Image: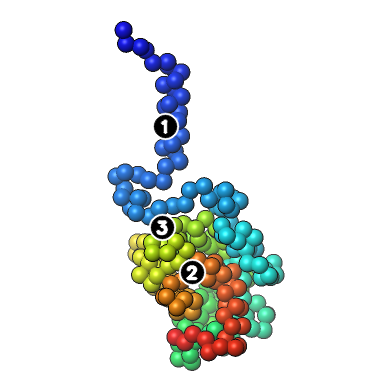
């Protein structure tokens, strides 16, 4: 006589299977979900990793953000931009951006080119009026308006920092070293983040990550997770400028 299965046991197994499927990060018929792995149990290392942070840029290793870095009640995106606001008046003019790049160690030609690109691309969207300004200023108060598409999503539309998206970046694309990205991996990441027909976003993303790679790559040609995190809150720029005071610095 074939023993009958307990209905309650079957119901429990179905619930377990449903729960497992609900939390699955892999779909068998979508191989890309297997190729680009996502971190599991991230919330055990970092409280509420998907909650956007307004003042600090934390990750699993730095749950309170950058130690010693002052936020000055600015959003993380504003902190990122404020390094170039040399006179601290809330407005970044092209000559300030040029001086900022020079302080980071870029040569005159590359600093001039980077400055022109940034101000032409970002100035108008941050202005407090509809009228363009020939001075091409960037207003830090409105820097969130300059956020473009095809990016990593580490900033939300208000300029807050989303820790989970930084963790996803490295879990998906850092293949050779878990907490570092090679130039090839950076290229793959920017390609994967590209939104259809977002030509400006494609170019902006490649430009930004290319400049960061030149600035912060290590001797082995990798860009570390810590450098990326500190770029988001601007503390990387402060660190590089201070280091350059006693060193030659990186030249583009």
Q: What numbered label is drawn on residue 26?
A: none
Could you tell which of marks 3 and 1 lies nearer the N-terminus? 1
| Residue ID at (45%, 66%) | 180
| Residue ID at (49%, 58%) | 167
The residue identified by callout 1 is 17
Q: What numbered label is drawn on residue 224?
A: 2
The residue identified by callout 3 is 172
Name the outermost residue toward the top.
1
Could you tell which of marks 3 and 2 lies nearer the N-terminus? 3
- The 10 Å Cα crowd at callout 3, few under 14, some 14 to 19, many 20 or more, is some
Circle 1: element type: helix
Are the residues at dot 2 and dot 1 in contact (C-beta closer than 8 Å)?
A: no
User: In this rendering, does residue 86 appear at all?
Assistant: yes
Instruction: Answer with left or right where residue 35 lies relative to residue 177.
Output: left
Circle 2: element type: strand
Are the residues at dot 3 and dot 2 in contact (C-beta closer than 8 Å)?
A: no
| Residue ID at (41%, 37%) | 21
Nearer the camera: disc 2 or disc 1: 2
Q: CA distance from mark 3 to mark 1?
A: 26 Å
Q: Nearer the viewer, residue 196 or 84?
A: 84
Q: Position of residue 72 (x, y in %)?
A: 70, 70
Circle 3: element type: helix
């Amino acid at each position: 006589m074939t023993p009958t299965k307990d209905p309650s046991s079957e119901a429990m197994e179905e619930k377990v299977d449903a729960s497992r499927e609900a939390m699955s990060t892999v779909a068998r018929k979508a191989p890309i979900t297997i190729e680009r792995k996502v971190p599991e149990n991230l919330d055990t290392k970092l409280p509420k990793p998907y909650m956007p942070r307004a003042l600090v840029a934390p990750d699993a290793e730095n749950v309170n953000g950058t130690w010693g870095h002052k936020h000055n009640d600015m959003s993380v995106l504003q902190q990122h931009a404020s390094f170039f606001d040399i006179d601290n008046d809330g407005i970044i003019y092209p000559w300030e951006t040029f001086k900022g790049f020079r302080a980071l160690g870029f040569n005159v030609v590359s600093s001039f080119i980077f400055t022109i690109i940034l101000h032409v691309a970002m100035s108008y969207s941050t202005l407090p009026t509809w009228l363009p300004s020939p001075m091409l200023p960037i207003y830090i108060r409105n820097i969130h308006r300059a956020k473009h598409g095809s990016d990593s999503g580490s900033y939300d539309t208000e300029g807050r920092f989303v820790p989970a998206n930084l963790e996803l970046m490295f879990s998906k694309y850092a293949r050779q070293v878990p907490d570092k990205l090679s130039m090839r991996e950076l290229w793959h990441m920017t390609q994967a983040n590209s939104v259809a027909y977002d030509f400006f976003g494609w170019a902006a993303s490649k430009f930004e990550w290319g400049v960061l790679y030149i600035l912060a790559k290590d001797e082995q040609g990798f860009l570390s997770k810590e450098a990326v995190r500190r770029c988001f809150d601007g503390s990387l720029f402060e660190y590089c400028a201070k280091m350059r005071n006693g060193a030659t610095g990186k030249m583009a």
